[in-house]
Amino acid sequence: MKTELLHKYFRGETTEKEENQIVEWVESSVENKEHFLKERMLFDVTLFSDGSNIQRKPKRHLYLYPLIAIAAMLAIVFVMDLPHMHKPKQQLSQTIRIPAGQRAQMDLPDGSIVWLNSQTTLTYDENFGKKDRKVTLDGEAYFEVAHNKEIPFYVQTENIKVQVTGTKFDVCSYKGSNSFIARLIEGSINLLTNNAKEEKPITSLTKGKYFSMENGKYKTGEMSSNNALAWMQGIYYFDDVPFKELLDKIALYYNYKITVKNPKILENYRCTGKFKDLDGIEHILKVIQKDHPFKYNIDNEHNKITIE
């Protein structure tokens, strides 16, 4: 990887294509991660020592909960989306991307706290908290929203928008999954249709309630426990869930493509238990094998698993 491109990235001047190229390169080997870290340190020292006129943004606190410490230090990606020079002045946006196998906690400029799960992206404008408080979420996050009746807090997902003033809740909505779930721990939230022309209220939640959408069908009810939030400690519970649902979960978390050659395996298998993020995907498959016999092959080089 060219040093000039890395420095361009550190300055927040790379394109999305270049950012993806750098992230893939960093995650491809330990040597690349170490080189990235070394260049980042040298870049920061250079900026500090030469007194450059670079306007630094207000400090944001990010607390990492990694599987592998050095990977977590390097794989959290901050992106500054810059407007093109020929376009009218636009707001800059901040994007935080959490890679597979990592979790992070961060403070937003308004004092709200967010926990971000694996493979999650959170985006907000640089003026967040001044005139509005809107974030766009692709993935899963737990929010403790700072109270402010004058400026409501919005979480925009692919299908549904969440409106709050100050509360604690979890939202899970990965793009392309056609599913959404919100769990309310404290306070209240409003759920709205995600329509640019007209926002229509769907329902409101009070403490201890959940709302889910699966393939366009809505469901609400009481939370049976807080096990669904255990991901914040790196623990995942599953209670009598279809085998396919569990495979989808671990494929997403560990960033593996799982192919099931024999569809009959998925028909009658249901699973109950828990796994920790440190267990690793092969350990999880071996545990499931004890109750549900099947064969699998892991291609770690290409992050692929075949089950038959």
Image (cartoon, rainbow, N blue to C red):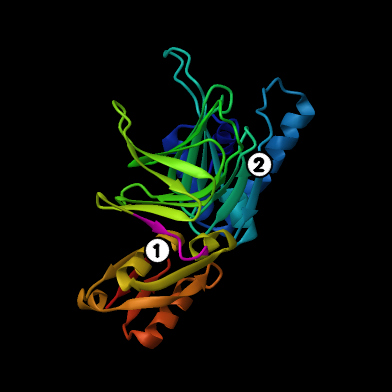
Q: Amino acid at mark 2?
A: Arg
Q: Which residues are magenta?
A: 220-226
Judged left or right of residue 216, residue 240 is right
**Sequence-first disc among 1 and 2:** 2
- Relative to residue 278, is residue 183 depicted above or below? above
Bin the neighbour count of mark 2 within 10 Å (Cα to Cα): few under 14, some 14-19, many 20 and up: some
Question: Picture coordinates of residue 42 (x, y %)?
Answer: 71, 39
Q: Nearer the viewer, residue 245 or 303?
A: 245
Q: Is residue 20 magenta?
A: no
Please determine whether, in this image, residue 97 is positioned above or below residue 92.
below
The image shows residue 148 at horizontal and vertical percentages of 59, 31
Q: Is the C terminus in the top left, top right, bottom left or bottom right quadrant?
A: bottom left
Q: Position of residue 242 (x, y in %)?
A: 31, 71
Please, which residue is most extreme toward the right here? 49
Q: Which mark is residue 240?
A: none
Helix, strand, or loop for circle 2?
helix
Foreground of the two, 234 or 256? 234
In the picture of the structure, the residue carrying the numbered disc 1 is 249
Report whether 145 appears left or right of 163. right
